[in-house]
């Protein structure tokens, strides 16, 4: 777990702010769920790997609880219990920290942040397409370049396994192997579970099927699974989702991989991850999960969602230098003013000037609080990138004036406080 200092914290908040703006643009209302929940709830469908990495403990009441490793289970619980009567579709947004005992390495932390968007109540391809389009908007908004979506459909894969009578638990472990791209092991496990050679061949062909021309790839997938009615339906669903994005001019790069699965066990349909150039770990992921609410006794509520990973997006932006200027513009106001009292007797006046500036302008206003002399305060201000110093002295104050020093030009003038406010004011 890390301490995030200044730039790192600001970059994280910049992405959070953009994520919030996008939630508003697409009509997702915020929900805040607890960081600690019953272990059973969080562990139910999080997948074997994530389950082993949860922070689990007994609370003082003897309940087995855990720190949330993701948002989806908590939000599904909320929808299944307290939001049953809310009109559908229900669009919900969350943002916050999550905990997984992952092996520390580049972009992999034990405490990390996600923005999370979930759409409940629609099983239509337009809902899946909306989640992909929303994700694309966020990535564009934060200024990320050269990213692509890796898209698959676990419905296609699971349908083949179900067709052969393979139970859900076994399917889950096969999906875990697929998530790690252990294709040989997948075929071995599927064979052991009882699939005939024809299905193994079908799966093998799917693992080879990928590309970014969605029409061609989905047609190929349709052809490969044509003897499996449910898998064919799932393939048509994937084709419809991608078709909608094309028709809607969502111009992101979608790379379709028929053998792509994700570690979380609740997915039932389209799944995806986002990759940024120069990084081989996903900066976000999501997909459709139509059975989770039912598991939490909330009836049949189809759902689809995404969680962009804020820490990894921040790393990706850092790598793409030019985007940094976008962030700096947002987190660093153009003008940073330091108000310095000439001596202790002028401190009250300095406070007043600083307060008025903050109220009536959009600049950052700091007050000299170290008791430094004017010249020491100015050289310190220089070092810290302050753009202007306002020096409050008794002589000028008598005429309701102050000295304004431009730190980069190294010039100064005596100006009326009203003029100062006009210069840095909201309309200035
Ligand atoms: P996930 O793929 O486990 O999906 O996580 C989503 C994103 O969170 C990842 O792509 C990554 O950017 C970030 N992330 C995950 N683990 C770490 C880590 N240890 N350090 C830094 N970043 C990390 C989910 O969590 C699903 N709940 C997404 C979802 C929402 N599916 C449907 N709705």
Image: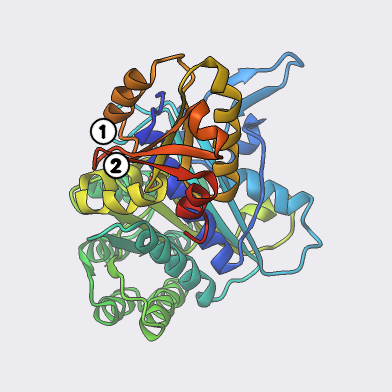
- Outermost residue on the right side: it is 85
Q: Is residue 295 left or right of residue 152?
A: right
The answer to whether residue 54 is visible is no
Q: In this picture, is 9 found above or below 425?
A: above
**Mark number displayed over residue 315:** 2
Tell me whether circle 2 and circle 1 mark residues in contact (CB < 8 Å).
Answer: yes
* Image coords of residue 211 (percent x, y): 21, 70
Residue at image location 28% in from the left, 59% down from the top: 200
Give whichever of 55, 387 is nearer the camera. Answer: 387
Q: Is mark 2 within 8 Å of ligand 1?
A: no
Q: Quadrant of ligand 1?
A: top left
* Image coords of residue 130 (percent x, y): 49, 71
* Image coords of residue 356 (percent x, y): 59, 42
- Helix or strand or loop: what does disc 1 sit on? loop
Question: Badge 1 is on which residue?
Answer: 106
Q: Is residue 312 left or right of residue 266?
A: left
- Estimate the spatial distance between the alpha carbons at disc 2 and disc 1, rounded to whole Å: 9 Å
Query: In which image quadrant can residue 216 be found?
Result: bottom left
């Amino acid at each position: 777990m890390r301490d995030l200092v200044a730039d790192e914290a600001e970059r994280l908040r910049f992405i959070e702010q953009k994520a919030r703006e996008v939630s508003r643009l697409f009509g997702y209302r915020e929900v805040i769920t607890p960081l600690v929940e019953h272990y059973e709830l969080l562990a139910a469908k999080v997948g074997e790997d994530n389950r082993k990495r949860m922070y689990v403990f007994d609370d003082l009441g003897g309940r087995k609880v855990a720190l949330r490793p993701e948002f989806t289970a908590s939000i599904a619980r909320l929808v299944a219990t307290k939001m049953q009567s809310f009109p559908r579709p229900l669009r919900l947004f969350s943002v916050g920290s999550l905990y997984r005992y992952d092996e520390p390495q580049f972009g992999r932390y034990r405490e990390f942040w996600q923005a999370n968007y979930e759409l409940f109540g629609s099983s239509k391809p337009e809902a899946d397409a909306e989640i992909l389009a929303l994700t694309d908007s966020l990535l564009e908004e934060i200024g990320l370049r050269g990213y692509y979506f890796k898209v698959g459909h676990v419905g296609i894969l699971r349908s083949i396994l179900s067709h052969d009578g393979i139970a859900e638990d076994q399917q889950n472990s096969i999906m875990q192997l697929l998530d790690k791209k252990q294709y040989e092991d997948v075929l071995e496990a599927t064979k052991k579970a009882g699939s005939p050679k024809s299905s193994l061949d079908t799966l093998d062909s799917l693992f080879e099927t990928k590309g970014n021309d969605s029409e061609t790839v989905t047609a190929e997938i349709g052809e490969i699974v044509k003897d499996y009615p449910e898998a064919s339906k799932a393939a048509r669903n994937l084709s419809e989702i991608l078709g909608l994005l094309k028709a809607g001019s969502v111009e992101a790069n979608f790379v379709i991989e028929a053998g792509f699965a994700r570690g979380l066990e609740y997915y039932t349909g389209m799944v995806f991850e986002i990759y940024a150039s120069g990084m081989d770990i996903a900066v976000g992921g999501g997909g459709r999960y139509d059975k989770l609410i039912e598991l939490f006794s909330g009836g049949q509520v189809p759902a689809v969602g995404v969680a962009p990973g804020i820490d990894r997006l921040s790393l990706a932006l850092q790598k793409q230098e030019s985007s940094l200027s976008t962030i700096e513009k947002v987190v660093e106001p153009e003008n940073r003013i330091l108000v310095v009292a000439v001596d202790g007797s002028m401190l009250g006046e300095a406070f007043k000037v600083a307060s008025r500036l903050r109220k009536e302008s959009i600049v950052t206003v700091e007050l000299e609080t170290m008791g430094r002399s004017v010249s020491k305060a100015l050289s310190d201000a220089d070092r810290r990138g302050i753009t202007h110093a306002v020096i409050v002295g008794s002589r000028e104050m008598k005429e309701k004036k102050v000295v304004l020093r431009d730190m980069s030009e190294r010039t100064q003038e005596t100006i009326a406080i009203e003029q100062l406010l006009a210069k840095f004011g909201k309309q200035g």
